[in-house]
Amino acid sequence: MAPVGAVNGYAVLETVAALPISTWRYLWEPEDVRHLGPMAQDWQVAFGFNQDGTTIPVVDGLGVALVCVQALNRRVEELTAEVDRLRSRNTHRDPEGSTP
C-alpha cells in the first residue's frame, strides 16, 4: 500500500476556487453536447496528480470534491460559532450599547 499523507482542506479549497471552469466537448461528440469542468491541463498544473495532463482521474476529482466539502463544513461551523458568540454578546449589552 502506498504511503498516506495528510491534506490541508483549506489549501485544496483555495486551489479549486482559482481553477478555471468552462464548458467543453470531446472532438468526436456532436456540437450540441457540452460538459462542465476544468481542463485536464489546468487540473494537472493545480494538483499534479496525473502525469499526462490529458485526463482527470475520477478518483482524484471525487477526493478533491470531498476534501472541499469538509473544508467548507469546517468554515460554516466556525462562522456559525462566531455568529452565536456575537449574538450572545449583543444580548448582554444594555440599551445604550455599552457592556455591563
Image (cartoon, rainbow, N blue to C red):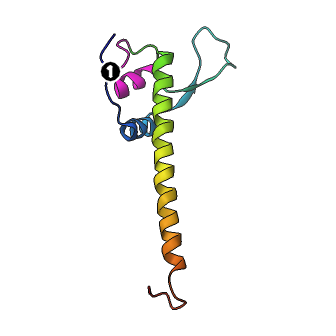
Crowd around label 1: few <14 · some 14–19 · many ≥20 (10 Å):
few
* Residue denoted by label 1: 4
Question: Which quadrant of the structure image shows residue 4?
Answer: top left
Confirm whether the magenta stretch covers residue 63: no
Looking at the image, residue 36 sits to the left or right of residue 33; the answer is left
Q: Residue at x 54, y 78 (%)?
A: 91
Q: Looking at this rendering, what residue extends furthest in the right direction?
A: 32
In the image, residue 31 above or below residue 77: above
Percent across and percent down for residue 57 are 47, 15
In the picture, the quarter occupied by the C terminus is bottom left
**Residue range of the region highlighted in magenta in the rendering:** 40-52
In the image, residue 36 above or below residue 87: above
Percent across and percent down for residue 48 are 34, 21
Q: Residue at x 45, y 40 (%)?
A: 17
Looking at the image, residue 16 sits to the left or right of residue 32; the answer is left
Q: Looking at this rendering, what residue extends furthest in the top direction?
A: 28
Looking at the image, residue 12 sits to the left or right of residue 31; the answer is left
Confirm whether the magenta stretch covers residue 48: yes
In the picture, the quarter occupied by the N terminus is top left
Residue 3 appears in the picture as rendered = yes
Residue 39 appears in the picture as rendered = no
Tag 1 secondary structure: loop
In the image, residue 49 above or below residue 19: above
Q: Amino acid at mark 1?
A: Val
Q: Main secondary structure of the magenta part?
A: helix
Question: Which quadrant of the structure image shows residue 53?
Answer: top left
Q: Nearest the camera: 74 or 39?
A: 74
In the image, residue 11 above or below residue 56: below
